[in-house]
Amino acid sequence: MTDNAPAAGTTVPYDAVVLAGGAARRLGGVDKPGLRVGGRPLLDRVLAACATARTTVVVADPRPTARPVRWVREEPPGAGPVAALDAGLRHTEAEYAVVLSADLPFLAAATVGGLLKALVSCGTEGALVTDADGRDQPLVAAYRTSALRRGLAALADAHGSLTGLPLRRLIGALDLTRVPDPLASFDCDTWDDIATARARIREHGHVLDEWISAVKDELGIDLDVDTGVLLDLARDAAHGVARPAAPLTTFLVGYAAAQGKGGPEAVADAARKAAALALRWEEEAEQSEAARAAEPAERNDAARAEAPRPADQPDPGSHTG
């Protein structure tokens, strides 16, 4: 389980249910949640977006993940999304549940927080994302767990089983708030979708944030730092000292921060000190260059002052009449 905490940007405690047990037929039956986008499995990317959930339940067979979760399976396995949601919801206790599929490469914590805010402020039974064409995405949504449980019970009574039922049977009976978000709703159903997602994160406007997030997950670091400060430091070290000083300096700043408080403030403080040192090095170099540039002129002036004068040339310091 994750720590008991609210979603990013909201004070609403919630549980998360992630459905990750689909057959991925359009991908040839591969393990879709394990496909990597930006060096991270799709499932890990989704788990990062709901990392502040009080309890995170993944409906699928267990596998290694970057964050601890509770694993469950629907009965029978492969019984469909409604049965999977019912299985996951049985292990939640919060008033609100964020329900997600495991194939959302661009889902962000801000989206999760926004859905919870919309749900609470509008007073509806659910808040879900709509895609670029305005279609509902019931697996990118936040719901009141009481409404989901009530709807699941009604379906079970009406059909005798939840196996094979489509989600629209459950969601269609709920009072919903809709939040347009074409990016968060982008899911990976085909190899073209995977290729599109992999290409997008390498675009100039996204690659740095994606890389930092991937490295933090890989190293098990949960720390928000001002990347602008570190980039400025790297620039100052490269310009004021030497190019190889840039990565070495940022490494030492991280090490110093870890020895101290270890939080964002410690990183910023160490970065400021290192940047000031790099600027002092640059100032010394500039002073030395200026001194070296002045030396030839000074030597020429001294040489002219000491050079013997022709006999017929008067001493400029004397006065003759």
Image (cartoon, rainbow, N blue to C red):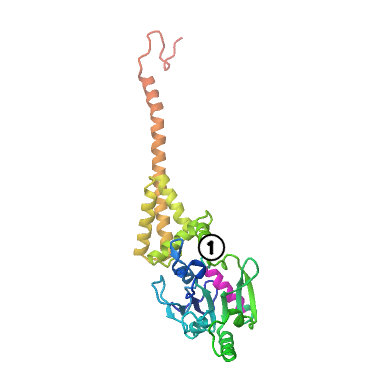
Q: Main secondary structure of the magenta part?
A: helix
Viewport quadrant of the N terminus: bottom left
Residue position marked by numbered label 1 in the rendering: 193
* Vertical placement of residue 305 versus 29, above or below: above
Asked if the stretch drawn in magenta spans residue 121, the answer is no
Residue at the image point whose x is 42% and y is 79% from the top: 71
The question of residue 113 being in magenta is answered with yes
Image spot of residue 292 (x, y percent): 38, 33
Place of residue 257 in the rendered image (x, y in percent of width and height, measured from the top left): 37, 62
Q: Where does the image place residue 170, in percent across and percent down from the top left?
A: 60, 82
* Looking at the image, residue 191 lies above or below residue 79: above
In this view, the residue farthest toward the top is 312
Q: Position of residue 14 (x, y in %)?
A: 51, 79
Q: Quadrant of residue 296?
A: top left
In this rendering, the count of numbered labels is 1
Helix, strand or loop at disc 1?
helix
Residue count near mark 1 (Cα–Cα under 10 Å), binned few <14, some 14–19, many ≥20: some
Please state the extent of the stretch shown in magenta in the rendering: 108-120
